[in-house]
Amino acid sequence: MKKLTFFIILLFSTAGFSQNKTDSLFIAFKKSSFYESVYPAKMQLENRQKEIIPELIKLLKDTTFVKLTGTGDLIYPGATEFYGHGHYVPYDMDWISVRAGWLLEELTFQDFGYKIVEIDEKDLIKLMKDNYPEYIHKGKLNLTWKKKNTKEKWIEFRNILALNAENWWKKNQKDWTRMNAIKEALTSKNENQLSDVIQYLRYGETACEGLTKESYEKEIKPIVESLILSEYTDNTRIVIEYLIRDGLGTDLKNRK
């Protein structure tokens, strides 16, 4: 009886510690410093996979604005300067709801509509070429995000996105796994989803239960190889070919 009591206490203590850790990560995720708080918390939360999705769904309705600081050369819709290089994240992460959408979409490989694909690599290269003397003089260039909208319209729009995500989770929460999400995204015909999942398979650093070198070769690789016969944009076709050529990324291969 004493052993059983000890086991129950230990079980609840472990669960409590895990919940406290998750809570602290969400607190860090909502802070302002990108590289000191937000990004490290995002990576650790993503490792928790299914566990964090309900809380992310709740955060999608958060209307708080927290301007990112310590962004360095980060390029995102809240950035106003471009240093000629940087980490590109096409989400307006100054809004907590969009920050949650960023993590939710990268975790699930779903396309709920939070991504703002307005400035891509070609645009940045053109910006550099057209304003090269200014860049050489200042070491940076100003960025203009044309699709910025009024605060009220954005909040209204994001409430719709949040509702769609909530309905998706109600329908899928019972059987959802990240491994199945990978397969779904690869066969979705949605190029946003396909781009995200290929990026993860090539360079991902966060956990996916069931994904190993062996399971990739057996379950994922045949799906990837079949994509070469489908019609996609040139950019998507190129990354498909790279994944076929290089296979599963080193970090994912080496995860235990």
Image: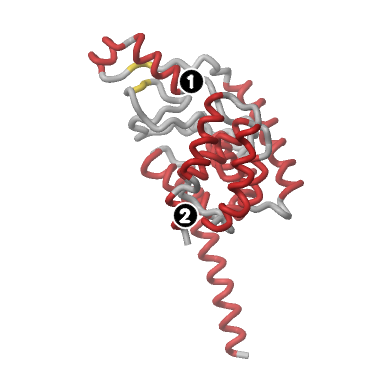
Which SS class for mark 1?
loop
Instruction: Measuring from the top left, give residue 114's x and y in whole percent.
Output: 59, 31
Residue wearing tag 1: 119
Residue at the extreme right of the image, as rendered: 171
Residue at (23, 13) in percent of width and height = 137
Q: Which mark is residue 175?
A: none
Residue 231 shows in the view: yes
Instruction: Measuring from the top left, give residue 129's x and y in whole percent.
Output: 34, 12
**Of the residues shown, which amino acid type is indicated by label 2?**
Lys
Residue at (64, 49) in percent of width and height = 54
**Of the residues shown, which amino acid type is indicated by label 1?**
Ile
Residue at (45, 15) in percent of width and height = 144
Comparing 187 with 84, the one in front is: 187
Instruction: Locate residue 79: give its quadrant.
Output: top left
Q: Distance from label 2 to label 1 (Cα)?
A: 32 Å
Rendered image coloring scheme:
secondary structure
Do the residues under discs 2 and 1 have CB atoms within 8 angstroms? Answer: no
Nearer to us of marks 2 and 1 is 2
Q: Quadrant of the N terminus?
A: bottom right
Q: Which mark is residue 253?
A: 2
Instruction: Measuring from the top left, give residue 132's x and y in whole percent.
Output: 30, 12
Residue at (59, 39) in percent of width and height = 105
Please report whichever mark, 2 or 1, sits nearer to the chain's N-terminal start. Answer: 1
Count residues near mark 2 (Cα–Cα under 10 Å), then give few for <14, some for 14-19, many for 20+. some
